Image: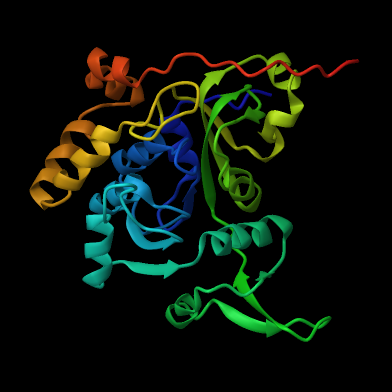
Amino acid sequence: MSKLQPLSEAISRFVHDGDTVYAAGFTHLIPFAAGHEIIRQGRQDLTLARATPDLIYDQMAAAGCARKVIFSYMGNPGVGSLRIVRAEIEAGRLEWEEYSHFGMISRLQAGAAGLPFMPMNQTGATDLEAANPDIRRLTDPYSGKEVITVPALNPDVAIVHVQRADAQGNAHLWGIIGEQKEAAFAAKRVILTAEEIVDEAIIRSDPNRTLIPGFIVSAVCHVPFACHPSYAQGYYDRDNDFYLKWDKISESPDSVKAWLDEWVYGVKDRQEYQQKLGEETLERLRVPPLQSVPINYGRY
């Protein structure tokens, strides 16, 4: 049964005010298109969880979508601070919880496994324990040593971008793999956006690359170029120029509002956004093919 639907419909059906939203992806495959659609639809009071909030949560916070952020690193990668999220936290208008990267993934692993919490080895990040009362210590009943524990995280909805998927939601992704699989299995609902929608036979031809199985997916959306200014391995490069520009844009509420009005509210979907970027930018971000060596699976 096909789960294909427009991204606007998937957001309307599966993202509600007050939800905990996990937009997955680590350095690449960041679902900016879905974040922009959430802004366009005026969702509010969201808890935004992500290992690295990146610019997408800066933009969503600027648009008034967020009540709280849960994260394990916060910044404009390679540039500096996330000015908007930081300012909202410092002003007391945005609640927050911070974990280590491994702490965030452990929370998702607990949620995916149906466990109430996940134990971790002690780390050097003891300041996080002082700042976050949900990071607690327990005694290991087997060794008697102390372990760190973090509570399970079960997002209401996980949004995962992939390189290709079939219409049922079985998805291939490659390159730097972050917490996509853990987030998808921990979430109550999963919206999958994909650069390509392919025949089921293509997915079946490389089963080891199928990190997201269709049975946990709620909606499948064909959204090429969904990651910009992030990147999708094998499809387009990271727009480093935009990350630098956002640092300047985010200095002023007026310039942020102008950017949102032009690039989010001013376009109806990702296709219009891509067209608006222009051929010069698209050409700059194109990547030459670099094929992996084929895998011989032997008997089928």
Q: Nearer the viewer, residue 182 or 218?
A: 182
Residue 229 relative to residue 23: left or right: left
Q: Position of residue 83 (x, y in %)?
A: 22, 56
Residue 273 relative to residue 291: left or right: left
Image quarter in which the C terminus is found? top right
Decide if residue 236 is in sight here: yes
Residue at 29% across / 39% down in the picture?
Answer: 40
Residue 245 relative to residue 170: left or right: left
Q: Is residue 41 above or below residue 92?
A: above
Q: Nearer the viewer, residue 125 or 6?
A: 125
Q: Position of residue 4 (x, y in %)?
A: 56, 24
Residue at 45% across / 14% down in the picture?
Answer: 288
Residue 176 relative to residue 64: left or right: right
Residue at 73% across / 14% down in the picture?
Answer: 201
Colour basis: rainbow
Q: Is residue 187 above or below residue 151?
A: above
Image quarter in which the N terminus is found? top right
